[in-house]
Image: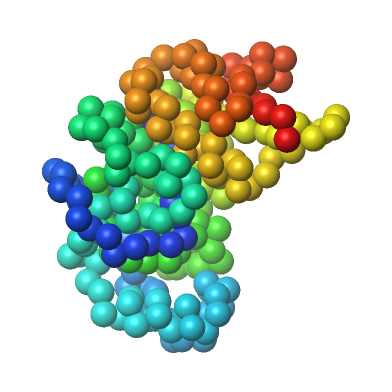
Amino acid sequence: MKIIISPAKKITDKNDFEYQNSYPLYLKEASVLYDHLKSLDLLKLKELYKTSMAITEKMYQTIRNTDITRPYLTALFAYDGIQYKYMAPDVMNDDELAYLNEHLYILSGLYGALRPFDLIVPYRLEMGSKLSINDHKDLYDYWHDLYKLFKDELLINLASDEYSKAVTPYLNNVINIRFKEKSGNKLLEKGIYVKVARGAMVRYMAVNKISDPITLKGFKELGYKFSDELSDDKEYIFVREG
C-alpha cells in the first residue's frame, strides 16, 4: 500500500533532522526541468509562477545559485504548509517515520514523486503550471509515465486534484479520500480544512501502522466520521459538522 500527498508551495531551509537520506528517483528528469527554469528570464519566470515581483526575484536568484545535483534539504521536513504542520513529522518516533518512509510519496511538479527522506533543493513549480518543455505540452505530459510507480500496489490518494490527476486516471487500484463539512443540507469541501485533515490522516496512518485500508474507516480525528452512506470501495468520505 502506498500513500500520495501534495507538496507545499513554501519550502524552508530547515535541515536539522538526521536520517538515512536518499536521492530522488527522478533526479535526471528533474535536472532537465531545473535547467529549463534557469533559462527563463525574470519576466518569463514571473509569468510562469504568477507571483509578485519580490517573490519572483527571490526564486530567480535561488534557481541561478543552486545546483540541483547537490540537494541538501530533507523533503518531508522542508515543505512548510498546513498539511505538514498537522502531519507533524518532527515529533514522530522512529517507527512512525519508518512507516512513512515505506509508504508515503510526495508528488511534485519538479521531482515527479519524492520519498519522505529524499534530498531536494529549494524550488517552486506546481504540477498545474503552464510549462511546455521539449515535446511535452505541460508537466502532466512530461510526467506521463509517473503512474507506473504505483501500478502494482493499492494507492491511498490524499493528494489534491492538481497533483493526483498526474497518476490516478491511469490506475484502477486507488482509494480516494475526501473530507467534507456539513453545512445545513449541504456537504462542502473547504480547502484549508481539507489540508488539515489530510495531514492528520497521514499522521493517523503512521501512528497506527495502517496496512489494511478498511481500518482507515476508524479515523475520527478533528471531529470527522466515516460515512458508509456516501462512500464506496473507490472513495472514502469523511464528514463532520460545520
Residue 219 visible: yes
The quarter of the rendered structure image containing the N terminus is top left
Looking at the image, residue 91 sits to the left or right of residue 196; the answer is: left
Point 54% across, 63% down: residue: 129
Whole-percent x, y for residue 185 in the image: 85, 29
Whole-percent x, y for residue 105 in the image: 36, 40
Point 72% across, 15% down: residue: 229
The quarter of the rendered structure image containing the C terminus is top right
Q: Residue furthest right?
A: 185
Point 14% across, 43% down: residue: 20
Q: How many marks?
A: 0
Q: Which image quarter: residue 63?
A: bottom left
Residue 141 visible: no
**Residue 81 or residue 242, whichever sits in front:** 242
* Colour scheme: rainbow
Whole-percent x, y for residue 72 in the image: 20, 61
Point 50% across, 56% down: residue: 127
Looking at the image, residue 218 sits to the left or right of residue 145; the answer is: right
Q: Which image quarter: residue 231?
A: top right
**Residue 59 or residue 201, whichever sits in front:** 201
Looking at the image, residue 151 sits to the left or right of residue 52; the answer is: left
Looking at the image, residue 154 sits to the left or right of residue 16; the answer is: right
Vertical position of residue 184 compared to residue 115: above or below: above
Q: Which image quarter: residue 160?
A: top right
Whole-percent x, y for residue 9 in the image: 47, 60
Vertical position of residue 230 compared to residue 139: above or below: above
